[in-house]
Image (cartoon, rainbow, N blue to C red):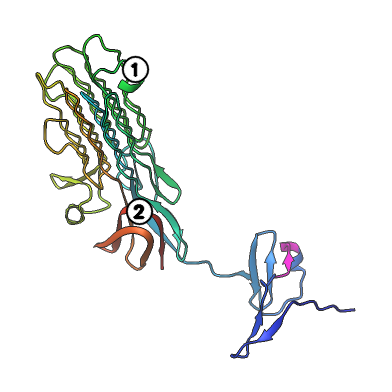
Amino acid sequence: MSELKTNKISTNDQNNVAIDNALGLKSYTTTARNALTSVAGDMIYNTTESKPQFYNGSAWADFAPAPSLTVDFLIVAGGGGSGFDRSGGGGAGGLKTSLDNNSSDTNTGFLLQTSTNYSVTVGASGSGGATNEARGSDGSNSIFHLYTSDGGGGGGAGGGVSNATQRSGRNGGSGGGEAGGDAGNTQGSPGSGNAGEGFNGGNGRFNNNGSVGGGGGGASEVGADGSAGNGLQVGGDGLTTTIITSAIATSRSVGEVDSGNVYFSGGGGGGADERERNGAAGGLGGGGNGKNLSDNTGTANTGGGGGGARLNSQAGSAGGSGVVILRYPNTYTASTTGLTATTDSIEEDTVLIITAGTGSVSWA
């Protein structure tokens, strides 16, 4: 005896059949499927392979998947801010890339599907320490699909700080520099960077007539230690990349161009005792300079760390915001939601430069 159960079946104005509820295909294992007597057009759900299939008249076949494309990426997190008064430089935002990566982490481009949304977040910069004993804040993380780059660690705070933790640089994608201080002050330690993203901050120098904070770590090297010489507590340099050209970097105000190379994620320079020394230079890749040099804030859309503060209750400087850059064949078109993005062409590729926001990207 046959039984037909239905909620509702009707025809629409094009004379096709409309079904209110989801259509459930009959489930079979591969063995049970092969035992069927099938005709072209039959459809089942294969529980062995966890996918729907159809019979093409001679064999069972899979429904065609969405086309795939390879996407290379550069994911730079926000840079850390520097601390208050003779502070360590902010650590650079963590950097992950599928191109030109000379860190210990080996990444490859993603094989992605069209018509699928992939998550993106561009990390904001960390703020500088604004009050006595305040360390710089960490930068925020940047994300693309399965990878997260960690925000740079804030720089340690100097001045009258007696707490070793407050003098220490914060850990992050790259570590913040340790603050300097007088010879009798409690010492801390530099912040640690993450393997494959960035390096440690530098040590501070403790001397009554020449205290300086250590430089913030960069994506390619450790921030320099504070020393007796002037300007030696520089931030660590960032990494170069070929995911975009220097001309695109300049026109879109992303990265730092030096001698034709494009750098990201430079550490902030350390701050100094104003009686004898200037602050130090930030690392290539947007690192801010230590005060009283100019350009103390990390550069936007580089992940650079903030430059350290000087003696006499100076506030620290903010780091630079991060950026996410995606490169893919120009036969595809990207669409974004919730993101600030622009596109440029490089040979047979398109680069999507995302400078702010949290949202998604898809391709068609």
In percent of width and height, residue 293 lies at 11, 33
Residue that carries the numbered disc 2 in the rendered image = 357
Q: Position of residue 347 (x, y in %)?
A: 24, 62
Count of number-bearing discs: 2
Where does residue 143 sit, x and y in percent of width and height? 40, 48
Q: Secondary structure at mark 2?
A: strand
Q: Is residue 219 above or below residue 25?
A: above
Image mark for residue 313: none
Compared to residue 96, the image places residue 310 above or below, namely: above
Q: Which residue is mark 1?
A: 164
The spot of residue 2 in percent (x, y) is 86, 79
Residue at figure coordinates x 12%, y 30% from the top left: 292
Q: Is residue 202 magenta?
A: no
Q: Nearer the viewer, residue 114 or 362?
A: 362
Characterize the local packing of mark 1: few (<14), some (14-19) or many (20 or more) Cα atoms within 10 angstroms: some
Quadrant housing the N terminus: bottom right
Front-most of residues 76 and 19: 19
The span picked out in magenta is 25-31
Q: Residue at x 44, y 51 (%)?
A: 145
Residue 28 lies in the magenta-colored region: yes
